[in-house]
Amino acid sequence: MRTNSAWGLILLLGSLSVPAAAATLTLAPDRMAEVDGHRTFILGMYENPKEDAELDRLAEAGFNLVRVSGDEAALDRLHARGLWGWVNTGAAIDLSKDRTARERQLEALVKDCAGHPAMLVWEVPDEALWNCWYQPHCWRSGEEPAQQRALIDSLEDRDLAKALRAELARIGRLYGEARYAEGEEAADAVWMKLGETPPKPGYGVSTSAARAAAMCGGMVEGYRLLRRLDPAHPVWMNHAPRNTVAQLAAFNAAADVVGCDIYPIPFSTRVGHSDLAERSAAAVGAYTLRMQEAAPGKAVWMVLQGFGWGDIQPQRPEEVRRELRRPSLAETRFMAYDAIARGARGMLYWGTHAIEKDSKLWENLLELGRELSGLQAVLSAPEADLDVRVTFEEGMGSVDRGLVVLPKAVGDQTGLLVVNEWTGPLHYRIEGLKSLEGVRYVERESGKEATVDRGALRLYIAGQSVHLLMPR
């Protein structure tokens, strides 16, 4: 609920003031969000439910940020429930094209939204960097050859048809070797041999870097203008789980908060959402670290899975859609805490528009919201000044990843968030706890207890699961 929330991000001084009714966001030195000086952990939802009852349930469960259209009525609806909203700027943030018109669009957005008490964050176009590469890839490797094959199949000249089919196969091999410019030139030539004008000459993966550079420069300029117009509300940028750190870092100059969407459930060859070596649910933690590497000093909010892949791929056979299932409560909970342990200062859920509001997953998300909102004092607390080290007893697993421990200074007490990213169980030992000697800890979920003895704490933990340890 808004009355119990606090937000924050880096603010740049601007030329225009925002009405006093609007919240002011800052970013604490540890990147935790603050609003009007109060710390909080951010828990957001991309879907703004049409039904008031479901929006009420979101607020009651402790979600505090919802994506919203930039109009007064939509913001009023959130404000009535103690929620904040984030508004997408659309293409207006990119001043590399139609500069004058887009500057006016940004000015209008600020005029309409910035003074509203429910307004909290601006959002730039989703996955802007990735789409500079992905959209031309889809055209050149999917839509274009499909259209060309249809024309080839209608040819009466069988020799020409055979030659053009061979040429399409050669173009596919060129793309497979990353020889994009050669392949795109050859694809344009195929159109001409078919008696057609190439529909998108010069558009392809070979020119993606140039398009991305132009967009990046335009978005940085748009970001600076938006921050001058509205210094009280930060800019949030979501990436796809793709691209190099250098590419991400360039775009991140156009935002105060960054993150990426990562949806790794189920672990399947049919789900290629992560292209890192890590493909399990722990990919969430891996990408959380990657986002921080690409945006040093900026807050990271991760976008997590609120759907099953089968829910958003209706063209798949029914048996495949069943395989591409929704996350369980245990998986949903693990991914949330993995992001937190790896440094996320907030999380936003995408995909719930595709699930039923009487479904198990929707209830799981609300249950997790209640759990996290009940832990606001812990999650928003600064890290405790402890040099913790973790070891575990020998076992049969490779254990190429293990435990992450996040100590939290909650008043005069220290909480310990322990996340096992390994897929198997571990008997772990946390060392470096001399200042907590004799403190008895209780694991919040299971009720397990352990006492710090000779500066260490020992417990057993299941694979890819969580321990939240608080003093008894």
Image (tube, helix red, strand yellow):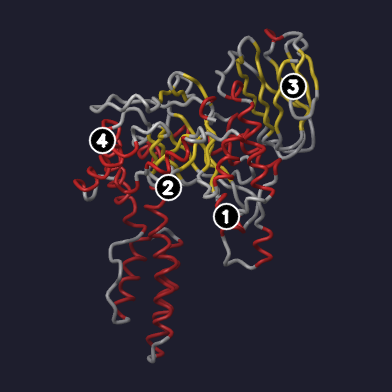
Q: Is residue 173 above or below residue 467?
A: below
Task: Tell me which amino acid carries mark 1.
Answer: Ala
Quadrant of res 20: top left
What numbered label is drawn on residue 427? none
Is 455 on the left-hand or right-hand side of 240? right
Query: Who is closer to the viewer here, 278 or 92?
Result: 92
Give me the residue at 26% from left, 35% from top. Answer: 225
Task: Tell me which amino acid carries mark 3.
Answer: Arg
Q: CA distance from mark 4 to mark 2?
A: 21 Å
Give me the residue at 66% from left, 66% from top. Answer: 318
Is 188 on the left-hand or right-hand side of 165? left
- Considering the numbered disc 4 on the image, is that residue within a helix, a strand or a loop? helix
Categorize mark 1 by other alpha carbons within 10 Å: few (<14), some (14-19), many (20+): some
Q: CA distance from mark 1 to mark 3?
A: 42 Å
- Residue 466 x %, y %: 70, 32
What numbered label is drawn on residue 127? 2
Give me the residue at 60% from left, 40% from top. Answer: 57
Task: Tell me which amino acid carries mark 4.
Answer: Leu
Quadrant of res 235: top left
Residue wearing tag 4: 225
